[in-house]
Image (spheres, rainbow, N blue to C red):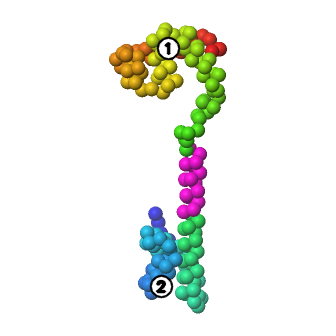
Amino acid sequence: MRVNNYQMQNAEIASEIFIKHWDFIYSIIRFKAGNECLVDDLFQNFFLSLVQNPPPSDLKNIKGYLYRAIMNDIIDNARHVERYHNLIEGYAEHSRYNKNEASPCEQLLNSEDIKKIVDYIEKKLEYNEARAVNLRFKDDMKIKDVAERMGVNGATAWRYISKGLDDLRRFLGRSQVL
């Protein structure tokens, strides 16, 4: 990046101001920041702000100017942080999944629909497959618990569930109505 004479001159002016008024600038920022972690960042940002917008050459009250410029930078920083937090909160609110709320699919299904699905499963599948699928998905059991309830090993329970789901997919592929 190439620096022109105007930018170089502004950097020199900002450096002179910082050398001469360092204690004043730092103490105002520290007092007004409200957060000790922000002080160094605000201090550096203020220097860059002075490089971009140096004080006018005919300025009579440099400390008054610096105080107002520091306050403006702190307010701008607070607004920036607030906008950032609002964006993050908005994103979090939008993407949050509340486990206590029903999913959109669950909201579409009422208890009658679920009963029809369970009946369909029981009619279309063999007894062990229907029982394994219902225990796994209707009762929300883990494979290990399904196997224990059915009195079989985990591999057998898994096989019943897999075959049952395959059969259901095949049946549902042909039929539009449960």
Q: Looking at the rendering, in which quadrant would you find the C terminus?
A: top right
**Residue, disc 1:** 130
Q: Residue at x 45, y 26 (%)?
A: 141
Q: Amino acid at mark 2?
A: Phe
Question: Would you name the residue on which mark 2 appears?
Answer: 24
Residue 163 spot, x, y in % from top left: 45, 13
Give the secondary structure at mark 2: helix
Front-lying residue, 66 or 98: 98
Query: Which residue does the image show at 41% across and 20% down from the upper left?
Result: 149
Whichever of labels 2 and 1 marks the residue nearer the N terminus, that label is 2
Please state the horizontal and vertical placement of residue 136, each as a whole percent of the image.
Answer: 47, 23
Residue 88 lies, in percent from the top left, at 55, 53
Of 19 and 123, nearer the camera is 123
In the foreground, 110 or 70 = 110
> x%, y% of residue 3?
47, 69
State whether residue 99 appears in this view: yes
Q: Residues within 10 Å of mark 2 (few under 14, many from 20)?
A: some
Mark 1 is surrounded, within 10 Å at the Cα level, by few (under 14), some (14 to 19) or many (20 or more) other residues, namely many
Q: Quadrant of residue 159?
A: top left
Image: 85 above or below 167: below
- Span shown in magenta: 81-95
Q: Is residue 61 above or below residue 171?
A: below
